[in-house]
Amino acid sequence: MNENNRNLALAIGLSMLVLFGWPFIQGHFFPAPPKPVQTQSSPSNTSSSSKGDQAGTGEQAGVPGLPNTGDATATGVVSRDEALTQSPRITINTPRLSGSLNLKGARLDDLILNDYHQTIEESSPKIDLLQPTGGTNPYFAQFGWTGESGLDVPTSDTVWSADSQELDVGKPVTLSWTNDAGVRFEQVISLDQNFMFTVDQRVINNSGDTISATPYGRIFRGEKPETLGFYILHEGLIGVFDGTLHERKYDDLPDEPGMKESFPTTGGWMGITDKYWLVALIPDQNNSVTGTFRQTGTADPQYHVNYIMTPQAIAPGDTMEQTGRIFAGAKETTLLDSYSENLNITNFDLAVDFGWFYFLTKPIFYVIHWLNSVLGNFGLAIIGMTTLFKIFLFPLAQKSYKSMSKMKLLQPKIVEMRDRAGDDKQKLQQEMMALYKKEKVNPLAGCLPVLVQIPIFFSLYKVLFVTIEMRHAPFFGWIHDLSAPDPLGMLTLFGLIPWDVPTLLHIVNIGPWPLIMGFTMWFQQKLNPPPADPIQAKVFGLMPIFFTFILGGFPAGLVIYWAWNNSLSILQQYVIMRQMGVAIGGGKADTSDSTEGTKSVAGKSASPKAISDDSAQKATSKDPDVSNAAAKKTAGKKAAGKKASGKKASGKKARGKNAPPAKPSNDDSAAD
């Protein structure tokens, strides 16, 4: 590997540090500033109820009749259980979901995910996705209508009637409410075996006048959640409008009163996403709607995702029907794909943030997912995927390692060139390029496996980081969560000392798997040609240590991948080097400086007889000094720049005019 090759590898390493290491360093040493404390006297920091009124007024200014959000946050915060008792409810009870539907406002505001816990411990609380108003973090979704020409429509304070007290799979619930004019509003709510709610809305005009109603859907989140703050992960508002993905982080939304972003679209979806969870509105995919993203408040912001359709005229005796859906649950990749295909939801799979290398990241996920179904363990699936990739890339790696082995054979020749060229870099480069061309060696071939590994590494990192399937996925031994760092560390003697390591020391509290990875990286370096530059050699010698500490905070599954990939690379490179007769361990190729000649780069031997005969012929010159100088010059060219010894030249040492002649060597005697 030449200087340019190593510079490229160093640049790649530093780039990976910036891409992957900075978020961890930032999280440990530069945490986000605390939220400003709300003060009653500040004009900009209004109370919760006034912010709700402001939000409602702003919405109604653009869309007449949209329910006021003044009740979104109560003036006093109560516990979740107490908030649930403040209004009538029907129970939600399925194998995967539990909670309740609020009959006041027909809101879905109490939802618990039965399959997921807050920590890896089974005894830890389950994930409570949606929260009722009046609690610490109100979070709900609902459908409704806005009315025109004085039409009395249900509001957030309307208490609906229900034909059942429980919502279950295959057991829909019908909510109804009738205004004083005889116009009946109905919502038929059903739930599948996973996380999709279907809401069939009906307006039955039993009055004597033509009315106009506009269906809408909305999601309200009463405060900003704790986000991870990683730039490679989107958390916040999200939507697909006319086939295009739009993402807005919480801090990116305009907070001026009345400001909102509008997205006219046909079909699509919109919602609020966390790392693993999603609440989304899905309108009828054949209808035109306008989606909006909005923030209200500054000191304690609230977030709104809405869509509204065009007004629908309903003649006396007619019925207007409209179907919408609410997804509220875990972002399981296969489940989102099935919804996208079966319900024709445009790009619903984009709710999982697979990132820049989406075209590579998602296939990698499905390979791991399939291998897990076969092997029964995601850790083994990662190892299996790595092996499959090595087999797939075998021809490329084989060519690369052969080129690197040839480069190692060339090292003695290159060192001699450096000594001859001195500070003449241009001459050195010309000679090296001529040598590479003659020996048919590509100095950049060693970088190809590294370049190929970068997108694979990044994609696997995304898979481990963002997919719910990897959350709390165990391996063997002490690895209980492949998406989390190795839980053991040197500072606790790998779990033998019960000590809570301070945050500032986490970067040096390296676990067993990062150490294994670092060792395999160091061993692989020993198989490569050593750098000629001593400074460069020191830098590359520190790279395994450097990456060991950096990757110590990465998901364990990623470290296992890298360690196994290094191990397979070591095995492959070792076999190739043995086949080509290359010295193992970073040493030089086997060469000979004996009187029988020197071994060439290509493995051919120079003829000692030709050298001796040529030297003897030069030694017959009348002037022994001239003869000796000529013999030295000839021997120097054939010995690749080395000084001619007494055996390879004329057998006479150079001396002054009065010096006695040297005693002939055995070779000189033979020549004579």
Image (spheres, helix red, strand yellow):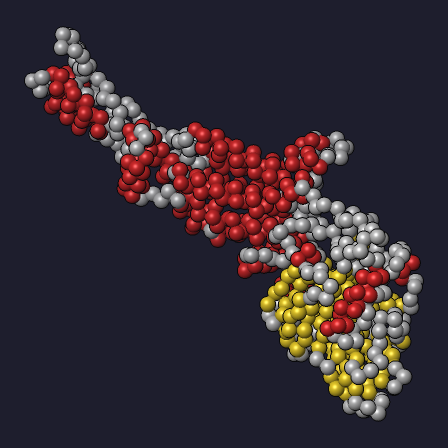
Residue 301 location in percent, x, y? 76, 57
Q: On the rendered structure, is 320 left or right of 554?
A: right
| Image quarter of the C terminus | top left
In the rendered image, the vertical position of residue 547 relative to residue 335, given as above or below:
above
In the rendered image, the vertical position of residue 216 relative to residue 499, given as above or below:
below
Residue at coordinates 31% horizontally, 29% vertically from top-left?
A: 422
Q: In the image shown, does 573 or 125 lie closer to the viewer?
A: 125
Q: Is residue 557 visible?
A: yes
Residue 123 location in percent, x, y? 82, 49
Q: Quadrant of residue 147?
A: bottom right
Residue at coordinates 39% horizontally, 38% vertically from top-left?
A: 2
Residue 377 location in percent, x, y? 66, 51
| Image quarter of the N terminus | top left
Q: On the rendered structure, is 175 left or right of 313?
A: right
* Label total for image: 0
Q: In the image shown, does 585 or 88 lie closer to the viewer?
A: 88
In the rendered image, the vertical position of residue 309 relative to residue 574, given as above or below:
below
Q: In the image shown, does 296 or 454 lie closer to the viewer?
A: 296
Q: In the image shown, does 112 or 60 lie closer to the viewer?
A: 60
Residue at coordinates 60% horizontally, 50% vertically from top-left?
A: 461
Residue 260 location in percent, x, y? 69, 66
Q: Quadrant of residue 31?
A: top right
Residue at coordinates 30% horizontally, 37% vertically from top-left?
A: 426
In the rendered image, the vertical position of residue 473 relative to residue 278, given as above or below:
above
Q: On the rendered structure, is 183 left or right of 637?
A: right
Q: Is residue 169 visible?
A: no
